[in-house]
Image (tube, helix red, strand yellow):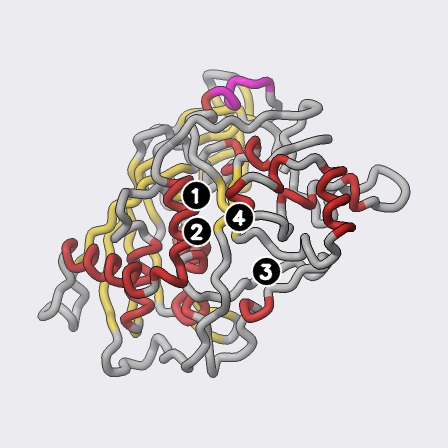
Amino acid sequence: METSYENKPYFFVPLANSADRRQAFNRQNLLAAHTRAGKLHVTIECMTPLHIGAGQLTFDETTKRFSRALLRENGHIALPGSSFKGMLRAVFEAISASCVLNAPRSLPLKVGALGACSNNSGLCPACSVFGRFSYKGKLTISSFYTDAEPIVLKIPPLEQPFRTYPRPARGEWDPRTGNERLYYGNFSDIHGMDVARMSKADFFTRKDREPRSGGNFYGRKFYKHSNGWKILSERPSKGSYECLPTGTKLNGQIVYQGLTEYEQGALLFALGLGWQQPILHKLGYAKPAFLGSVKLTVEPKPLPRYEDTPMTATDAQRIASQYYEQHQTMIGPAVHALRQAWSEMGDSMWTPQDNKYGY
């Protein structure tokens, strides 16, 4: 099955050259000098429908069908703080000198100096802020709540990406039948689209000719924003999902303590502050089907014990902007890729092939 990068619902954000582990970062429970503490009120506005699954079914009286239910806490539709934290960490990692936690071991690919942090004596910024095994992070994120009335949408079947793509129906796996070129290579910048437009035969011919090529990740994988969800939700599907409609707002908060100047700037920048033009984020289920596009509004709030030096909204924008200016050389390519894909909704479409939505 032939596929091309330009017809996929995702894009790649270039990796940093190395992870910054030059110092052992202070722990959350220690009030070290010159560290930052604060509270941020965050409003999530749905730009496309949002589904946060509860793992349960609900019966819809209108369609007379069972649908996968939204998560609820104490009678309110909720987005767990852990879900928001996972999304935020992914963006934070992309715009900082942070490690690559989950590089696949089954492929002949190396991440070099971006390998996962192995001990707490020297952590990358993401592991320092968000935590890792045996180390507690410096953020406490609440659940986000809304009392909006949900809608029910059909979502096309979503296949799990194959570790060795594609999974063989019978016999031994032949890598030449896979979509390897969509995930890694070294012939050209993926954003230049040269490799993305190659046929599989051309890709593997060039890889055989240049054996040292084709062994680098294109970057971190993120999903595009698009109003194409409307067309996808109209296609025949056996799956119905309870979703929050466009325009819904959910409210929650982030409390942080013990952040260095670098970490605070990266956190605010990952939330969307300090960008030359506003960006959107992605949350929840069915990101490939363009669900879960959200806009974040961040408002600093006073934190007890630190009320004498509150951070204003203007201060937050300035801190985030300064972070980007000071580290532009290192994070510039990643920011450019995110800005290109995340600054507007766009009109991308996920095209099925052989009646399947492949990854």
Please name the residue that numbered disc 4 is placed on: 221
Q: Are marks 2 and 1 in contact (CB under 8 Å)?
A: yes
Q: Quick check: 172 above or below 58?
A: below
Q: Residues within 10 Å of mark 3 (few under 14, many from 20)?
A: few
The residue shown at (66%, 37%) is 198
Identity, as a three-letter code, of the amino acid under mark 2: Met
The residue shown at (16%, 72%) is 305
Q: Nearer the viewer, residue 339 or 146?
A: 339
- Give the SS element for disc 4: strand
Q: Residues within 10 Å of mark 4 (few under 14, many from 20)?
A: some
User: x and y percent of residue 119 in the render?
Assistant: 53, 79
Please name the residue that numbered disc 3 is placed on: 102
- Give the SS element for disc 1: loop
Residue 164 is inside the magenta segment: no
On-image quarter of the N terminus: top right
Camera-nearest label, 1 or 4: 4
User: x and y percent of residue 321 in the render?
Assistant: 24, 57
- First in sequence: mark 1 vs mark 3: 3
Magenta segment range? 231-236
Q: Are marks 1 and 3 in contact (CB under 8 Å)?
A: no
Cα separation between marks 3 and 4: 12 Å
Please name the residue that numbered disc 1 is placed on: 283
Identity, as a three-letter code, of the amino acid under mark 4: Lys
Q: Are marks 4 and 2 in contact (CB under 8 Å)?
A: no
| Residue 288 shows in the view | yes
31 sits to left or right of 219: left
